[in-house]
Amino acid sequence: MHRIGLGIVAALVAAVLAGSGVVADAAPQAAEQALRSATSNEYVVVYAEGNAFAAEQAIIAAGGTVVDRNAEVDLMLVDTDNSGFADQVRDAQGVTGVALNHSIGTARPNMPHRFAEERPQAAVTGHPSANPGAKGGGAHGSDPLAPLQWDMSMIGATADGAHRRATGKGVTVAIIDTGVDASHPDIAPNFSNDLSINFTVDRPDIDGPCDTPTCVDPANVDEGGHGTHVAGIVAGARNGIGITGVAPDATIVNVRAGQDSGYFFVWETVKALVYAGDKGLDVANMSFYTDPWLYNCASAGDYVSGAVTPEQLAEQATIRQVVLSATAYAHDHGVTLVAAAGNGHANYALPQRSDATSPDYPPGTEVPRVVTSNCLDLPSEAPDVISVSSVGPSGTKSDFSNYGLGSVELSAPGGWFRDGIGTPTFMTPGNEILSSYPLELAIEEGLFDPATQQPTDNTSVADCSVSPCAFYTYLQGTSMASPHVAGVAALIVQAHGTGNKAHGFSLAPDTVRSILLGSATDHACPAGGTEIYTDEGRPAEFDAVCDGTTANNGLYGEGIVNAAAAVART
């Protein structure tokens, strides 16, 4: 396989990044990524501590090339054309696990974006009524679109609530996602170019044509949209424009691990977590699961039904091993980890789990299976991660949200399109979460008309009194719930941590977690013990049994996150 010389690639990447606003230190990282081939298979190889040399010799003998290393968790990234690589290396001296990271794949025609379900495809009515161009015209002296942010009012993340005590100043939040659009007017004031980094390489089979010669995007763009929406929820600036985030003065750090298409592969996920720990970031939001397995099993005994090969089991066991190691590493280095519980309306407290989506890469390889609850959804079910379910404006668990006593720890506003049954708000975009979105992507997706400088539908808002136009859209999902908790975690670090606004604050993740859980607003189970969604047009399998007490139950965990109470707590 032909490879470009490292020095040539480094020079090329440096030239690309020079005009992007990304710091020069990112060039070696991008150059390393550029050596990764889009025409061969990638594997992650785990080795026992002190056995890096032996593992590398086995990798070379099997026709592999080590293209990156992560010594913090004893991991190597390998590129190879050898289809039998995993079998040859798995039992080699010093090697404890091998998993496929990327493989040659062909996208299905019209394959949907990973997060397509977060924008409901039903006919909607109503239209945002706030005037985005009225600077400083929001409620309580906040931003113009604040009246549309029912989510911030619900949790007390407002100017006359939590923001009287803390705004996140001096706190860093890693957005481990599809990227962050640093040019967005509500993101730019809080975005850190110096700390932001991109660990992904675009793959044309799933992401579309590359936009740079190296297929490595700058660390200040988001061509998936998801990460920018998440970032605005966490820390949209209070600047007289658009929305206000939960922690409007927190520093946004783009630690990109997600492809444009929404896939999050294991190597990129691990690199992001280790980076967050090494850089001493305070909080990390993870609104995804690690591909290609929704649930990662440890042994054949975890399969109740469905076909699985020994190689696939070994791959799942390796993913478990390295993601759990990486979350522990980040936690032990001071990062409070928050993750979305998922949108599969599954009860994670049950002894079995159904999955018809795995493996989801390469596309078209999935096989229906039923597995035990020992098979983990990662990173949300890692011990060091706070898992968050979603509620709508009524405070009821969103029909799509995963749940389960002992699995979900907190709930937060994630939106629910079907909330408000029997009222004019039913199935309107205002039931969802309004946040920032990349303008160029909105144009590409047909959500914004640059000629008229107006949104093309009633699910978005734009303010073109600033340049570039500030674009916002409504989405729903546990992906939107998790960043509300991450934002409150940032407020807690400032309010209760050590340090100062100029040089930053710090607070142990276990302390942050304790304050989050202890200050949450209790939410009782529904009368009869089951939340029924058939009136909203959902089939019976969406109905959710609520186990537990008012103080801690399967639908809401220890309650709905409460920013005002969290910062006031002593």
Image (spheres, grey):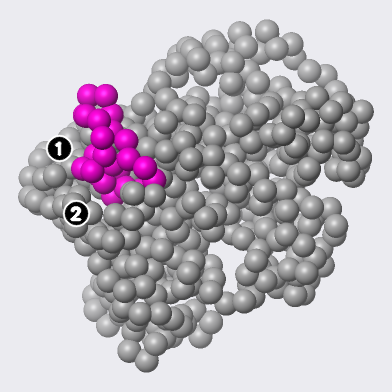
Residue 8 occupies quadrant = top right
Identity of the residue drawn at 51% across and 31% down: 275
Asked if residue 80 is positioned above or below residue 402 in the image, the reply reads above
Instruction: Using a 10 Å C-alpha cutoff, classify the residue at mark 2 as few (fewer than 14 neighbours), some (14 to 19) or many (20 or more).
Output: few
Q: Nearer the viewer, mark 1 or mark 2?
A: 2
Determine if the magenta segment contains residue 500.
yes
192 or 73, nearer to the observer: 73
Residue 429 showing in the rendered view:
no
- For the residue marked with disc 2, what is the amino acid? Arg
Asked if residue 228 is positioned above or below residue 517 in the image, the reply reads above
* Residues drawn in magenta: 486-509
Identity of the residue drawn at 66% across and 63% down: 375
What is the x, y in percent for residue 386? 43, 55
Identity of the residue drawn at 72% across and 54% down: 316
94 left or right, relative to 291 = right
Q: Disc 1 and disc 2: Cα gap in Å?
A: 29 Å
Q: What element carries label 2?
A: loop
What is the x, y in percent for residue 261? 57, 45
Q: Is mark 1 on a helix, strand or loop?
A: loop
What is the x, y in percent for residue 298? 73, 59
261 or 561, nearer to the observer: 561
Residue 82 showing in the rendered view:
yes
Circles 1 and 2 in contact, beta carbons < 8 Å = no
- For the residue marked with disc 1, what is the amino acid? Gly
Residue placed farthest to the bottom in the image? 528
Indicate which disc residue 569 carries. 2
324 or 64, nearer to the observer: 324
Q: Along the polypeptide, which appears first: circle 1 or circle 2? A: 1
Residue 503 occupies quadrant = top left
Indicate which disc residue 240 carries. 1
What is the x, y in percent for residue 346? 53, 72
Asked if residue 546 is positioned above or below residue 204 in the image, the reply reads below
